[in-house]
Image: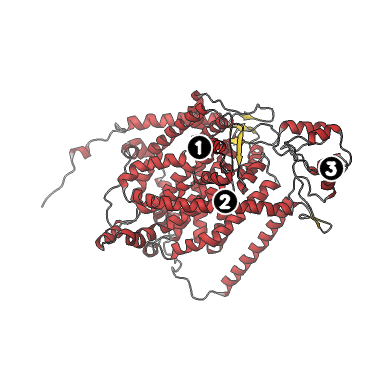
Amino acid sequence: MRRLFPSPDSLRPRAPFSRWDLVVIPGILVLLSLLTVALEGATQPFGPRSPDLTVSLEPVYLPYYSLRSLLRMLLAILLSLSFTFVYGSIAAKVPRSERVLIALLDFLQSLPILGFLTASTAIFVGLFRGSLFGLEAASIFAIFTSQVWNMTFSFYSALKTVPKELVEAAAMLRLSPWQRLWKLEVPYAMPGLVWNAMMSVSGGWFFVVASEVISVAGREREQYLPGVGSYIALAIQQADVRAMIWAGISLFLLVLLYDQLFFRPVVAWAEKFRLEQSGAANTARSWVLTLLQRARLTQRIARLPAALWEWLWLCSARFSRVGSALEGRLTRRRRERLADLGFNLGLAVASLSLLGVLLSYLFGPGLGFQGGRMLQPNPNLNRNFSPELARRFASLGIAPGADRTVWLSQLCAASQGGQVVREEMRTLLHEPEVGAPANLVEACSRPLAPTGKVAWPEVWEVLKYGLCTMLRVSAMVLLAACLWTPIGVYVGLRPTVAQWAQPLAQFGAAFPANLLFPLFVVALANLRLNPEFWLSPLMVLGTQWYLLFNVVAAAMTLPNDLKEAARMHGLSGWAWWRRLVLPATFPALVTGGITAAGGSWNASIVAERVSWGSTTLVATGLGAYIAHWSTGAFNPHVGLGMLVMGLLVLAYNRLLWQPLYRLAEERYRLD
C-alpha cells in the first residue's frame, strides 16, 4: 500500500503576510488617501453667498481634477450596477411588469442628460443645502444616467436568453430564485455585463463635460465643478489649444490607469464565467489580478463576507418547498385573468393621470386652449438669455425670470398691448439679440400661452426637429454597425489581439468627442460646409463603441465547441458568417444597436450645437432645441423636448428593435 504524507512546506507555519503584500498594502493605503482628498473637496460649503465655482486651466491642477472626476465615475458605476441587478431581474422575471419596465427603460435611455441634469439640480441642491455635495450629487446622477441603460439592457437580455439546459439543471438542483440568480444567471450574464460596464465608464467620459458644468437657477454664471470635464469645457469656451492638449494627455493616462488597475483584472476574472464545453486556448490575464490573488491580506478581506453569504444562502434555500413548473399551464385560471385585467386597468388609469398632470404642466390650466381658441406661442424675447439684456428689461419695469427669460406677454402688458412703446423700450426692441415681433400690436392681439408655457403650434415644430434628429441617428448607427461588426468579431475571436485592442478601444470610447468638436467647427466654418449634414458624425463618435464592445463580448464568449464544429464542417467565407458568427452575435448586436441609438439621441444635445470660442454652429434638430432651453431650471420647453424625444425613441424601438429583440430571444440563443 502506498502512503502519502504532507510535504514539509505544507506543515510549516504560514506567515501572516507574503512578499505580494508589500505591494498591495501600500497600494490600498494610497487609494484610501486619495479617496479622502477627493471626498474633502466634494463636501465643502456652498450656498447662495458662496462665490461662483470655476476651474483653472493651469496643467498643475489636472491631477486633482482627474481625481475628482474618477470619484464621480466610481460612484456612478456602483449605482448603475445596483440598479442593473434589481431592475433587470424584475423586468425579466415578472411577466406583468416586463412590458412596463422595458418600455420605461426605452423611454428613459432616450432622455438627454441635460434634461436629467436640469431636473435634478434643484432637487439635490435643496436636499444638501449649504454643501457642495448637492452639485456633486447632481453631477453623479447625470453620469449615472449616461451609464446605466446599456448595462441594464445587457443584463436583461442575458436573463432572457439563458440556455434551457441550464434552467432545467437549476430546477433539478432545487435552487431557489435567490440561489438561481447568483449561481446561474449573474455568472451567465457576467462576460457581457463586464464589457458593457467597461463601455459605460468609457462612454461616460463623453458626457462628463456636460455633467460637470451646471447651470444653477439664480446665478448668472455656470458652476464649474473641479474635474476634467469642466476643464475641457472652459478650454473650449476660451479657445485654449494648449489646455486641450493637456486634457487629451490626462485622459490618455487616466484610461491607461483604470484599464490596468480595474478593467483588465475584471475581464480576466470574468473568464471563469464563460459558457464552455471545451477549454479555451487563450485566456485573458492581468498582473493586478494575480497580485490580488496571491496577497494574503486581500484573501482575508475576500473571506470576510463568507459568513453573511452562507446565512443568506441558507435562508433562501428551497428545502422541501415545491418549486414552480418550468412550462406554463395551457389554460389559466380565472383568478389570473382577473389579475391581468386589474393590472391593465390600473396601468391605464395611472398613465392617463400622469398624462393629465404632464399636459397641465406643459400647456397650463386650459391645456393650450382658452374660450375655444387655441393659444399662440408666447416667445422668449431674450433669445440668448443675456444677463445684460435681462438688466435692461428690468430697468424698464419688465421683470425677467430666474433664468433671464422675458416673455412677449410681459412686454404686451407693459406696453398696453403694444400701443404705448417708450423710446427706451423701442431702442431695446431693435437690438439684434431681442426676438421682438415686427408688428407688436398684432402679436399682442392674439391669445398668448401663459408665461413660460408652450403652445400647440410649438409641438408640431418640435416634432419636426425630432424627425430631423431621428434621420441623423438612424443613418449614423447603421454606418457604425456595418463598420464595427466585422472588426468586433475579429478582435473577439482572438484573445491575444483583444489584449492590446482593449485599451485602444477603451481610450477611443473614453476620449470625449468634445475635444474633437473644435476641429469640426473650424473646418466647417473655413470650408463653408453645411452643418445640417456635417455635424451628424459627431452624434456617433462616442456611441459607436456600444456596438463594438457588445460584438467583442459576444465573440469572446462564443463556445469553442461551436467554433470547432464549424471548422470540421469546413465553413468559411459567407457561410461561416451566416451559420455561426451572425447568429451567435445577433443578440449582442441588437443590444448594442439599442444602446448606441439611445446614446446618439443623448449625444445630439451636444452635437447639434457646437462652439469654439465665439464661433457657434447649430444644426436643426431636437438636441439643439433642448440645449437652447437648458437654462438651469426645469421648464416646460425642456419638458416638451424630453417628452417628444422619449416618445419618438419609444416608437422607434417598438417598431424596429423590439421585433429584432424577440427574434434574438426566440431563435438566436445558445440552447
Badge 1 local density, few (<14 within 10 Å), some, or many (20+)? few
Q: Residue at x 45, y 42 (%)?
A: 509
Q: Is residue 427 left or right of residue 631?
A: right
- Percent position of residue 221, x then y: 66, 31
Measure the C-alpha gap from mark 2 to mark 3. 38 Å
- Front residue of 529 and 32: 529
State the residue position of label 3.
Answer: 412
Q: Which is closer to the viewer, label 1 or label 2?
A: 1
Mark 3 secondary-structure assignment: helix
State the residue position of label 1.
Answer: 516
- Looking at the rendered structure, the kind of residue marked 1 is Leu
Q: Quadrant of the C terminus?
A: bottom left
Q: Is residue 73 left or right of residue 217?
A: left
Mark 1 secondary-structure assignment: loop
Labels 1 and 2: the sequence-earlier one: 2
Q: Residue at x 50, y 39 (%)?
A: 513
State the residue position of label 2.
Answer: 110
Return the residue found at the far bottom: 331
- Looking at the rendered structure, the kind of residue marked 3 is Cys
Labels 3 and 1: the sequence-earlier one: 3
- Percent position of residue 251, x then y: 46, 34
